[in-house]
Amino acid sequence: MKVVFVMEDNKLTVRAVERALDIMLCFTESTELTLTEIASRVELHKSTVHRLLASLEGKGFIMRDAATDKYRLGYRLWELSANLSQEGDPGIILLPEMERLRDLLGETISLYVQDGLERIRIQAVQSNHAIRRVAPVGARMPLYVGASSKVLVAFAEPAVQQQLIASADWPTGLDQQAFLQQLADTKLAGFATSVEEREPGAAAVSAPIIDRGGRLVAALAVSGPANRLTLELMQEQAPLIMEAARRMGTMLR
Amino acid sequence: MKVVFVMEDNKLTVRAVERALDIMLCFTESTELTLTEIASRVELHKSTVHRLLASLEGKGFIMRDAATDKYRLGYRLWELSANLSQEGDPGIILLPEMERLRDLLGETISLYVQDGLERIRIQAVQSNHAIRRVAPVGARMPLYVGASSKVLVAFAEPAVQQQLIASADWPTGLDQQAFLQQLADTKLAGFATSVEEREPGAAAVSAPIIDRGGRLVAALAVSGPANRLTLELMQEQAPLIMEAARRMGTMLR
DNA sequence: TCAAATAGTTTCACTATATGAAACCCAGTT
DNA sequence: AACTGGGTTTCATATAGTGAAACTATTTGA
């Protein structure tokens, strides 16, 4: 028997450029960094980073703060991103990010928006598991069950929220009380979970996507079979999902 | 006599990175480009561009349109430019003040910074008039015409100012003299005006925004059609604008 | 006030690595 | 079939990027 390891590094790519881009990506977490900070983050020698930064600075992608002399992102990004924002459709823009999250968690990722007294699934990337939830993009679901519903109502503008709560036709009086309590919990925690609320055997975690203007745009949801997505696991993953949702929010207008 | 040309471009910089960035900058003019289009714009071989694009694409700075397969800017730029405009960024901090000034004067208010031999419009609030100037945020303009250019050069640090004046390629010798005179006037008056300098039918007043450390941060500009913004009116409004700029300066850093 | 540490910059020898020519693939056209 | 016009891969070559180390400049701190 013969075992062959194939070190599949089929990179048709330019190392120096990738390094430079990694440097830029440092600024997704911090707005201001010193050369040595950057060097340690990207794990490169000071002098290398210095040269790369000089190139980035020369083209205006990085600038140095006049006062602190630290490095920060340059004006060229305004120029580019101004040109970039043609289609402002979150369903398109956020797709790559959703795919990344799917690859990370392995479960189906969906995007819901509130429309009237319903929520609409405007985008989804499917889990690769054999057993997975399947719901079509465009599907409409009620606004008083499910993790993403809670998020959509809990983080809605106050006026909208009032209306939603007032005009929903609740199945029974009891459910309403429970739902209101869950709204408060959701707002506090920053995310919501649901286990077999709408569909038997299904569970979901959801977090709000808030744009730069502070407006709720959509609810990001991770959903899967309840035996895989236990309440415990969902709570463990919640920070990760909230962070992903936050980052998605920054990508929107 | 001996004449020696020293082609002193002592660049401590990485060529591959600069080329990659040049590729990105192609997308300030077009939103979608093919590989060969890019190759001809940056004057490099297809294969070289292909490799650079692969690197950019791998890091999400460039993506390919699902339908046309053409190259376009990637979602990473949203992420970055979002982080760019956090606190500390005059474009965000001063926005409310700019809106107030707009409401007061009724004209378009812009914020310009100097970058190399250009000025960049980093923020703007539009006039509500039907007839108004429209220029996108991120637009780059030359540094030797327009009210805000004069302000940016006149109030630049001496060393920077020297360089700017030295390295500008002046259209004619005459213009330079006039410009230098205007710089002196600007410095003295504390503001600058322009009437149909860059665009026919457009006029502007501009005053420097100086932070608490005494550094020039940006030029605040009020612009509109020349028949509404007469020279007389602009001079009348100048003290108001200078005061607004002064107050904005105190808000920074 | 003078060490000592820290941050940034430049130099330099070495070879890893980016480069362009050319070949190649794949769809559409003519 | 030959041809055009996109994209991709291979490959020999020397260019150009690399990290160590030396060198400043600035800050800390004793």
Image: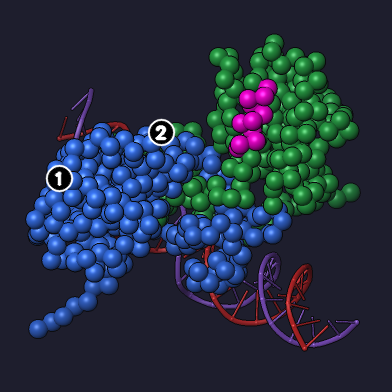
Chain colours: A blue, B green, C purple, D red
> Residue A200: where, in percent of width, then height?
8, 56
Query: Helix, strand or loop at disc 2?
Result: loop
Q: Which residue is mark 1?
A: A172
Tag count in the figure? 2
Q: Nearer the viewer, residue B21 or B3?
A: B21
Residue B102, relative to residue B3: is it above or below? Answer: above
Of discs 1 and 2, which sits in the foreground? 1
x 15%, y 45%: residue: A172
User: Which residues fall within the magenta stretch?
Assistant: B95-105
Q: As drawn, is A182 to the left or to the right of B114?
A: left
> Residue A33: where, in percent of width, then height?
59, 62
Residue A57, relative to residue A83: is it above or below? Answer: below
Q: Which residue is mark 2?
A: A86
Chief secondary structure of the magenta portion = helix
On the question of residue A78 being in view, the answer is: yes
Q: Nearer the viewer, residue A15 or A230?
A: A230
**What chain letter is assigned to the residue under label 1?**
A
Give neighbour class at mark 2: few <14, some 14-19, many 20+ (Cα, 10 Å): few
Specify the amino acid type for callout 1. Thr
x 28%, y 50%: residue: A180
